[in-house]
């Protein structure tokens, strides 16, 4: 669902109920100006805002987005918020991850869009654990390019591979390798030096493994 589709549905629900946009924002406890900015910038509200708006409108996430809920025991989150869809569609977060020198990770998550999960990733094993984000930078070329979209899970470190991580407060997509000293962070682009994170370090948080890359044409 695009941001335009989202706001069109909200507008229709308000019209059906004979209510105004200002009334909705006041009842939901969200800023009218912030919501107007979301509309102007063609963006879907963040998770918390969306749930508040839908609660006032009396509709569920599943009803609005046209998906049947199959909640899992671990909903996807980048910064702690939870949001459940199903094993057919996943949120694309506005948050960028860096294939470079790091991208600041904000405290709040903003859902930019929703996409169909590629067929090979569907199934109970990953249901509710997937989300997507865009990439900036060239450190993972020729595997991942600037402007690509990656689909990753939120299950932490499982085995050596490419992961979405937060290191020193910044978001990265890098290749992780378990070594005796801790975790080695490397780039596929040889221009970038590897980083060794000690076992007892609290500076690295592994979000989850990258399973799919959507290349920008």
Image: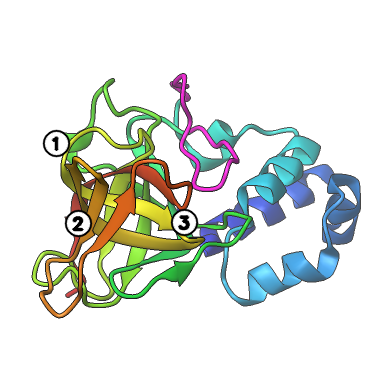
Mark 1 and mark 3: Cα distance apart in space: 21 Å
Residue 56 placement, left or right of 103: right
Q: Main SS type for the magenta part?
A: loop
Q: Determine which quarter of the picture holds residue 98.
A: bottom left
Relative image position of residue 181 (x, y in whole percent): 24, 44
Mark 2 and mark 3: Cα distance apart in space: 15 Å
Which label was assigned to residue 213? 2
Badge 1 vs badge 3, beta-carbon distance below 8 Å: no
Q: Which residue is mark 1?
A: 120
200 to 30, vertically: above or below? above
Q: What span is colored magenta in the figure?
A: 69-84
Relative image position of residue 104 (x, y in whole percent): 51, 68
Does the magenta segment cover residue 83?
yes
Quadrant for the C terminus in the image? bottom left
Residue at screen point 91% across, 53% down: 26
Q: Which residue is mark 3?
A: 93
Which of the marked residues, 1 or 3, is nearer the chain's N terminus?
Answer: 3
Mark 2 and mark 1: Cα distance apart in space: 12 Å
Residue at screen point 46% across, 53% down: 203
In this rendering, which labeled residue sits more in front, label 2 or label 1?
Answer: 2
How many residues crowd around disc 3 within 10 Å: few (fewer than 14), some, or many (20 or more)? Answer: many
Which of the marked residues, 2 or 3, is nearer the chain's N terminus?
Answer: 3
Q: Does dot 2 land on a helix, a strand or a loop?
A: strand
How many residues crowd around disc 2 within 10 Å: few (fewer than 14), some, or many (20 or more)? Answer: some
Residue at screen point 28% across, 77% down: 137
Q: Determine which quarter of the picture holds residue 20.
A: bottom right
Q: Does dot 3 land on a helix, a strand or a loop?
A: strand
């Amino acid at each position: 669902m695009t941001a335009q589709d989202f706001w069109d549905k909200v507008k229709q629900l308000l019209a059906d109920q004979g209510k105004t946009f200002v009334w909705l924002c006041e009842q939901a406890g969200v800023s009218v100006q912030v919501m107007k900015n979301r509309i102007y910038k063609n963006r879907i509200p963040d998770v918390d805002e969306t749930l508040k708006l839908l609660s006032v409108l009396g509709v569920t996430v599943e009803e609005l987005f046209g998906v049947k809920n199959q909640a899992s025991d671990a909903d996807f989150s980048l910064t702690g918020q939870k949001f459940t869809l199903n094993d057919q569609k996943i949120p694309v977060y506005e948050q960028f991850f860096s294939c470079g020198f790091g991208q600041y990770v904000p405290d709040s998550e903003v859902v930019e869009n929703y996409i169909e999960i590629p067929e090979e990733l569907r199934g109970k094993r990953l249901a509710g654990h997937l989300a997507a984000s865009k990439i900036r930078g060239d450190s993972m070329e020729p595997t991942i390019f600037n402007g690509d979209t990656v689909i990753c899970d939120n299950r932490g470190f499982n085995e050596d591979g490419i992961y979405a991580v937060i290191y020193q407060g910044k978001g990265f997509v890098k290749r992780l390798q378990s070594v005796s000293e801790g975790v080695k962070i490397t780039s596929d682009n040889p221009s970038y030096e590897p980083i060794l994170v000690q076992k007892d370090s609290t500076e690295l948080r592994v979000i989850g493994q990258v399973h799919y890359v959507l290349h920008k044409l």
